[in-house]
Image (tube, grey):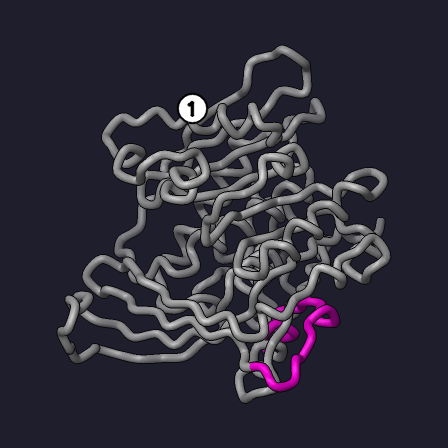
Amino acid sequence: MSPKIITVIGSLNTDLVSVTARVPSGGETLTGTSFHTGAGGKGANQAVAAARLSRANPHKSPTATSKGQDGENVDVDIVVKMVGAVGNDEFGPKLIAGMKEDGIDVSGIEVVKDQPTGVAVIIVESTTGENRILLNPGANSTLHLTSFLPSSPPFTPPPSLLILQLEIPLPTILQTITTASSTTPPTPILLNPAPAIPLPEEIYPSITHLILNESEAALLTGRSVSSVEEKGFNWEIVTEEFIGKGVSNVVVTLGSKGAFWASASAIPQSKTKTGFVPAEKVEKVVDTTAAGDTFVGAYAVAVVRGGSRGDGELDLESVVRWACKASARTVQKEGAQVSIPWADEV
Protein backbone atom coordinates (compact mmCIF):
# COMPACT_ATOMS: atom_id res chain seq x y z
CA MET A 1 0.00 0.00 0.00
CA SER A 2 1.28 3.48 -0.86
CA PRO A 3 2.23 5.62 2.13
CA LYS A 4 -0.12 8.36 3.28
CA ILE A 5 1.07 11.92 2.58
CA ILE A 6 0.95 14.74 5.12
CA THR A 7 1.78 18.06 3.47
CA VAL A 8 2.61 21.03 5.68
CA ILE A 9 2.48 24.48 4.08
CA GLY A 10 3.88 27.11 6.40
CA SER A 11 6.75 28.95 7.99
CA LEU A 12 10.38 28.05 8.56
CA ASN A 13 12.30 30.16 11.07
CA THR A 14 15.52 30.24 13.01
CA ASP A 15 14.81 30.69 16.73
CA LEU A 16 17.02 33.02 18.81
CA VAL A 17 16.23 31.96 22.36
CA SER A 18 17.14 33.75 25.59
CA VAL A 19 16.35 32.08 28.92
CA THR A 20 15.75 34.27 31.97
CA ALA A 21 14.46 33.83 35.51
CA ARG A 22 11.81 36.45 34.79
CA VAL A 23 10.78 38.64 31.87
CA PRO A 24 12.09 42.24 32.10
CA SER A 25 9.66 45.11 32.57
CA GLY A 26 9.56 48.06 30.17
CA GLY A 27 12.86 49.89 30.17
CA GLU A 28 14.53 47.25 32.35
CA THR A 29 17.69 45.33 31.45
CA LEU A 30 18.26 41.85 32.87
CA THR A 31 21.06 39.34 32.50
CA GLY A 32 19.78 36.08 31.02
CA THR A 33 20.80 32.64 32.21
CA SER A 34 21.45 31.12 28.75
CA PHE A 35 21.13 31.66 24.99
CA HIS A 36 20.84 29.29 22.06
CA THR A 37 19.74 29.18 18.45
CA GLY A 38 17.60 26.48 16.89
CA ALA A 39 15.29 25.51 14.05
CA GLY A 40 11.68 26.64 14.36
CA GLY A 41 8.65 28.14 12.64
CA LYS A 42 5.20 26.70 13.23
CA GLY A 43 5.09 25.05 9.81
CA ALA A 44 8.51 23.45 10.16
CA ASN A 45 7.85 22.42 13.77
CA GLN A 46 4.62 20.69 12.81
CA ALA A 47 6.30 18.91 9.90
CA VAL A 48 9.08 17.69 12.20
CA ALA A 49 6.53 16.57 14.78
CA ALA A 50 4.52 14.62 12.19
CA ALA A 51 7.66 13.00 10.78
CA ARG A 52 9.13 11.99 14.15
CA LEU A 53 5.84 10.84 15.64
CA SER A 54 5.17 8.58 12.65
CA ARG A 55 8.27 6.46 13.29
CA ALA A 56 10.84 5.34 15.84
CA ASN A 57 14.03 7.32 16.36
CA PRO A 58 16.46 6.03 13.66
CA HIS A 59 19.41 7.61 15.47
CA LYS A 60 18.89 5.24 18.40
CA SER A 61 18.40 2.11 16.31
CA PRO A 62 18.23 2.14 12.49
CA THR A 63 16.21 -1.07 12.57
CA ALA A 64 13.79 0.12 15.27
CA THR A 65 10.12 -0.66 14.72
CA SER A 66 7.78 2.34 14.71
CA LYS A 67 4.89 2.55 17.14
CA GLY A 68 1.33 3.77 16.63
CA GLN A 69 -0.59 5.77 19.23
CA ASP A 70 -1.79 2.56 20.85
CA GLY A 71 1.72 1.10 21.01
CA GLU A 72 1.23 -1.26 18.07
CA ASN A 73 4.07 -1.98 15.64
CA VAL A 74 3.69 -0.20 12.28
CA ASP A 75 5.80 0.13 9.16
CA VAL A 76 6.97 3.59 8.08
CA ASP A 77 3.69 4.37 6.39
CA ILE A 78 3.63 8.18 6.26
CA VAL A 79 5.54 10.64 4.08
CA VAL A 80 5.74 14.21 5.38
CA LYS A 81 6.29 16.99 2.85
CA MET A 82 7.25 20.56 3.78
CA VAL A 83 6.34 23.49 1.53
CA GLY A 84 7.73 26.91 2.42
CA ALA A 85 10.55 29.38 1.86
CA VAL A 86 13.89 30.32 3.40
CA GLY A 87 16.41 33.06 2.59
CA ASN A 88 19.77 32.64 0.89
CA ASP A 89 21.58 33.41 4.15
CA GLU A 90 23.42 31.32 6.74
CA PHE A 91 20.17 30.13 8.35
CA GLY A 92 18.28 28.69 5.37
CA PRO A 93 20.54 25.74 4.42
CA LYS A 94 20.75 24.62 8.06
CA LEU A 95 16.95 24.50 8.33
CA ILE A 96 16.64 22.43 5.15
CA ALA A 97 19.42 20.05 6.19
CA GLY A 98 17.84 19.47 9.58
CA MET A 99 14.46 18.59 8.07
CA LYS A 100 16.11 16.19 5.60
CA GLU A 101 17.75 14.45 8.53
CA ASP A 102 14.30 13.87 10.04
CA GLY A 103 13.18 12.18 6.81
CA ILE A 104 11.03 15.05 5.53
CA ASP A 105 10.56 15.67 1.80
CA VAL A 106 12.02 19.19 1.40
CA SER A 107 11.60 19.51 -2.38
CA GLY A 108 8.85 22.08 -1.78
CA ILE A 109 11.09 24.49 0.15
CA GLU A 110 12.20 27.44 -1.99
CA VAL A 111 15.42 29.38 -1.34
CA VAL A 112 14.58 33.04 -2.01
CA LYS A 113 17.32 35.42 -3.17
CA ASP A 114 17.74 38.77 -1.42
CA GLN A 115 15.51 37.72 1.47
CA PRO A 116 16.46 36.76 5.02
CA THR A 117 15.21 33.53 6.55
CA GLY A 118 12.40 34.08 9.05
CA VAL A 119 13.60 34.72 12.60
CA ALA A 120 11.78 34.33 15.93
CA VAL A 121 13.20 36.06 18.99
CA ILE A 122 12.03 34.00 21.98
CA ILE A 123 12.26 34.81 25.69
CA VAL A 124 11.71 31.81 27.94
CA GLU A 125 10.94 32.34 31.63
CA SER A 126 12.76 29.51 33.40
CA THR A 127 10.63 29.63 36.53
CA THR A 128 7.41 28.84 34.62
CA GLY A 129 8.53 27.57 31.22
CA GLU A 130 6.29 30.18 29.58
CA ASN A 131 7.54 31.97 26.46
CA ARG A 132 7.12 35.26 24.61
CA ILE A 133 7.86 35.39 20.88
CA LEU A 134 8.61 38.23 18.44
CA LEU A 135 8.43 37.03 14.83
CA ASN A 136 10.16 38.53 11.78
CA PRO A 137 8.75 36.61 8.76
CA GLY A 138 11.49 37.25 6.16
CA ALA A 139 11.21 34.77 3.27
CA ASN A 140 7.98 33.33 4.70
CA SER A 141 6.19 36.45 3.42
CA THR A 142 7.15 35.63 -0.18
CA LEU A 143 4.92 32.56 -0.49
CA HIS A 144 2.53 33.68 -3.23
CA LEU A 145 -0.96 32.36 -3.87
CA THR A 146 -0.12 31.47 -7.50
CA SER A 147 2.10 28.67 -6.16
CA PHE A 148 -0.96 26.90 -4.73
CA LEU A 149 -3.30 26.52 -7.68
CA PRO A 150 -4.83 23.08 -8.49
CA SER A 151 -2.01 22.06 -10.85
CA SER A 152 0.78 23.10 -8.45
CA PRO A 153 3.18 20.53 -6.92
CA PRO A 154 1.59 20.50 -3.42
CA PHE A 155 -1.57 19.04 -4.98
CA THR A 156 -0.10 16.61 -7.52
CA PRO A 157 -1.05 14.26 -6.04
CA PRO A 158 -3.31 15.70 -3.32
CA PRO A 159 -2.09 14.78 0.18
CA SER A 160 -3.99 12.62 2.66
CA LEU A 161 -3.97 15.62 5.01
CA LEU A 162 -2.97 19.26 4.51
CA ILE A 163 -1.70 21.23 7.53
CA LEU A 164 -1.83 25.04 7.59
CA GLN A 165 -1.03 27.79 10.11
CA LEU A 166 -1.13 31.61 9.85
CA GLU A 167 2.56 32.56 9.74
CA ILE A 168 2.50 32.97 5.94
CA PRO A 169 0.40 35.54 4.00
CA LEU A 170 -3.34 35.13 4.49
CA PRO A 171 -4.21 35.38 0.74
CA THR A 172 -1.88 32.41 0.16
CA ILE A 173 -3.62 30.42 2.90
CA LEU A 174 -7.08 31.23 1.52
CA GLN A 175 -6.03 30.17 -2.01
CA THR A 176 -4.59 26.94 -0.62
CA ILE A 177 -7.86 26.18 1.16
CA THR A 178 -9.81 26.88 -2.05
CA THR A 179 -7.55 24.57 -4.03
CA ALA A 180 -7.68 21.78 -1.44
CA SER A 181 -11.49 21.99 -1.42
CA SER A 182 -11.63 21.61 -5.21
CA THR A 183 -9.74 18.30 -5.43
CA THR A 184 -11.66 15.06 -5.95
CA PRO A 185 -12.35 14.07 -3.26
CA PRO A 186 -11.71 17.28 -1.27
CA THR A 187 -8.38 17.25 0.56
CA PRO A 188 -8.84 17.13 4.36
CA ILE A 189 -7.48 20.32 5.96
CA LEU A 190 -6.07 20.78 9.45
CA LEU A 191 -5.89 24.49 10.32
CA ASN A 192 -3.97 25.76 13.32
CA PRO A 193 -4.92 29.48 13.27
CA ALA A 194 -1.78 30.85 14.91
CA PRO A 195 -1.03 33.68 15.24
CA ALA A 196 -4.78 34.28 15.29
CA ILE A 197 -6.42 36.85 13.02
CA PRO A 198 -10.09 37.14 12.00
CA LEU A 199 -10.89 34.70 9.20
CA PRO A 200 -13.54 34.82 6.44
CA GLU A 201 -16.65 32.89 7.48
CA GLU A 202 -16.79 31.06 4.15
CA ILE A 203 -13.62 29.05 4.80
CA TYR A 204 -14.92 27.18 7.86
CA PRO A 205 -16.92 24.50 5.97
CA SER A 206 -13.66 23.50 4.25
CA ILE A 207 -11.86 22.91 7.57
CA THR A 208 -11.84 19.26 8.62
CA HIS A 209 -9.80 19.79 11.78
CA LEU A 210 -9.45 23.08 13.68
CA ILE A 211 -6.85 23.06 16.47
CA LEU A 212 -6.43 26.26 18.48
CA ASN A 213 -5.54 27.43 21.97
CA GLU A 214 -7.58 29.50 24.43
CA SER A 215 -6.56 32.95 23.19
CA GLU A 216 -7.00 31.97 19.54
CA ALA A 217 -10.46 30.55 20.27
CA ALA A 218 -11.37 33.76 22.10
CA LEU A 219 -10.26 36.00 19.22
CA LEU A 220 -12.00 33.97 16.52
CA THR A 221 -15.29 33.97 18.45
CA GLY A 222 -15.19 37.61 19.54
CA ARG A 223 -14.59 36.95 23.23
CA SER A 224 -12.07 38.43 25.63
CA VAL A 225 -9.23 36.15 26.74
CA SER A 226 -10.12 36.86 30.37
CA SER A 227 -13.66 35.54 29.84
CA VAL A 228 -12.52 32.15 28.53
CA GLU A 229 -9.93 31.86 31.30
CA GLU A 230 -12.58 32.11 34.02
CA LYS A 231 -12.90 29.03 36.20
CA GLY A 232 -15.56 26.65 34.93
CA PHE A 233 -15.83 28.25 31.49
CA ASN A 234 -17.94 26.03 29.23
CA TRP A 235 -15.83 25.26 26.16
CA GLU A 236 -18.71 23.42 24.54
CA ILE A 237 -20.27 26.81 23.74
CA VAL A 238 -17.18 27.83 21.75
CA THR A 239 -16.65 24.54 19.94
CA GLU A 240 -20.34 24.43 19.00
CA GLU A 241 -19.93 27.82 17.31
CA PHE A 242 -17.20 26.41 15.08
CA ILE A 243 -19.19 23.22 14.42
CA GLY A 244 -22.14 25.44 13.49
CA LYS A 245 -19.95 27.24 10.94
CA GLY A 246 -19.18 23.93 9.24
CA VAL A 247 -15.96 22.70 10.88
CA SER A 248 -15.98 18.91 11.29
CA ASN A 249 -13.67 18.53 14.31
CA VAL A 250 -12.53 21.16 16.82
CA VAL A 251 -9.87 20.88 19.53
CA VAL A 252 -9.11 23.67 22.01
CA THR A 253 -5.77 23.07 23.72
CA LEU A 254 -5.80 24.32 27.32
CA GLY A 255 -2.13 24.20 28.27
CA SER A 256 -1.48 22.50 31.59
CA LYS A 257 -5.19 21.62 31.91
CA GLY A 258 -5.46 19.45 28.80
CA ALA A 259 -7.70 19.76 25.74
CA PHE A 260 -11.43 20.01 24.97
CA TRP A 261 -12.65 18.41 21.75
CA ALA A 262 -15.83 18.37 19.69
CA SER A 263 -16.75 16.33 16.64
CA ALA A 264 -19.73 16.82 14.35
CA SER A 265 -21.75 13.68 13.81
CA ALA A 266 -21.84 12.19 10.32
CA ILE A 267 -25.57 11.66 10.85
CA PRO A 268 -27.61 14.83 10.12
CA GLN A 269 -29.40 16.38 13.13
CA SER A 270 -27.43 14.20 15.53
CA LYS A 271 -25.81 15.69 18.62
CA THR A 272 -22.17 16.83 18.46
CA LYS A 273 -19.81 14.57 20.38
CA THR A 274 -17.64 16.37 22.93
CA GLY A 275 -15.08 15.49 25.56
CA PHE A 276 -12.21 16.66 27.72
CA VAL A 277 -8.78 15.02 27.95
CA PRO A 278 -6.63 16.07 30.94
CA ALA A 279 -2.98 16.92 30.34
CA GLU A 280 -0.32 14.32 31.04
CA LYS A 281 1.44 14.86 34.36
CA VAL A 282 5.06 16.04 34.06
CA GLU A 283 7.72 16.51 36.73
CA LYS A 284 8.75 19.97 35.50
CA VAL A 285 7.73 22.24 32.64
CA VAL A 286 10.97 23.52 31.09
CA ASP A 287 9.85 25.18 27.84
CA THR A 288 6.41 25.29 26.18
CA THR A 289 7.64 26.71 22.84
CA ALA A 290 6.82 23.72 20.59
CA ALA A 291 4.13 22.04 22.69
CA GLY A 292 1.26 23.16 20.47
CA ASP A 293 3.11 22.20 17.29
CA THR A 294 3.89 18.75 18.70
CA PHE A 295 0.18 18.35 19.50
CA VAL A 296 -0.70 19.18 15.88
CA GLY A 297 1.88 16.74 14.47
CA ALA A 298 0.79 13.90 16.73
CA TYR A 299 -2.88 14.56 15.96
CA ALA A 300 -2.16 14.56 12.21
CA VAL A 301 -0.35 11.22 12.36
CA ALA A 302 -3.16 9.59 14.35
CA VAL A 303 -5.84 10.92 12.00
CA VAL A 304 -4.03 9.85 8.81
CA ARG A 305 -3.50 6.38 10.24
CA GLY A 306 -7.26 6.13 10.66
CA GLY A 307 -7.89 6.73 14.34
CA SER A 308 -11.37 5.24 14.29
CA ARG A 309 -13.40 3.03 16.59
CA GLY A 310 -14.04 0.51 13.82
CA ASP A 311 -17.33 2.04 12.68
CA GLY A 312 -15.64 4.49 10.30
CA GLU A 313 -16.03 7.49 12.60
CA LEU A 314 -12.98 9.23 14.02
CA ASP A 315 -12.22 8.33 17.63
CA LEU A 316 -11.30 11.90 18.48
CA GLU A 317 -10.81 11.25 22.19
CA SER A 318 -8.12 8.65 21.47
CA VAL A 319 -6.44 10.96 18.96
CA VAL A 320 -6.42 13.89 21.41
CA ARG A 321 -5.13 11.71 24.24
CA TRP A 322 -2.16 10.63 22.09
CA ALA A 323 -1.47 14.26 21.10
CA CYS A 324 -1.56 15.38 24.75
CA LYS A 325 0.88 12.64 25.67
CA ALA A 326 3.31 13.67 22.91
CA SER A 327 3.19 17.37 23.78
CA ALA A 328 3.86 16.52 27.44
CA ARG A 329 7.21 15.08 26.38
CA THR A 330 8.06 18.28 24.51
CA VAL A 331 7.60 20.68 27.44
CA GLN A 332 10.21 18.80 29.48
CA LYS A 333 13.07 19.93 27.20
CA GLU A 334 14.46 23.28 26.07
CA GLY A 335 14.03 24.46 22.50
CA ALA A 336 11.58 23.99 19.66
CA GLN A 337 12.39 21.20 17.21
CA VAL A 338 15.08 19.68 19.41
CA SER A 339 12.44 19.02 22.08
CA ILE A 340 9.99 17.17 19.79
CA PRO A 341 9.94 13.43 20.56
CA TRP A 342 9.96 10.42 18.23
CA ALA A 343 7.16 7.86 18.37
CA ASP A 344 9.12 5.42 20.54
CA GLU A 345 9.78 8.19 23.07
CA VAL A 346 6.08 8.83 23.79
Which stretch appears magenta? 98-115
- Residue 106 in the figure: left or right of residue 259: right
Provide the residue designation for mark 1.
Answer: 236
The correct choice, above or below, for 248 with respect to 266 in the image is below
Q: Residue at x 27, y 26 (%)?
A: 232
- Residue 31 in the figure: left or right of residue 12: left
Which sits in the foreground, 148 or 339? 148
Question: Residue 317: horizontal and vertical position, in percent?
Answer: 51, 31
The correct choice, above or below, for 25 with respect to 46 in the image is below
- Residue 57 in the figure: left or right of residue 288: right
Question: Residue 235: horizontal and vertical position, in percent?
Answer: 39, 28
Q: Residue at x 59, y 54 (%)?
A: 170
Question: Residue 202: horizontal and vertical position, in percent?
Answer: 64, 35
> Residue 268: which quarter of the image?
top right
Q: Which residue occupies the extreme bottom position in the image?
A: 90
Which amino acid type is shown beneath numbered disc 1? Glu
> Residue 98: which quarter of the image?
bottom right
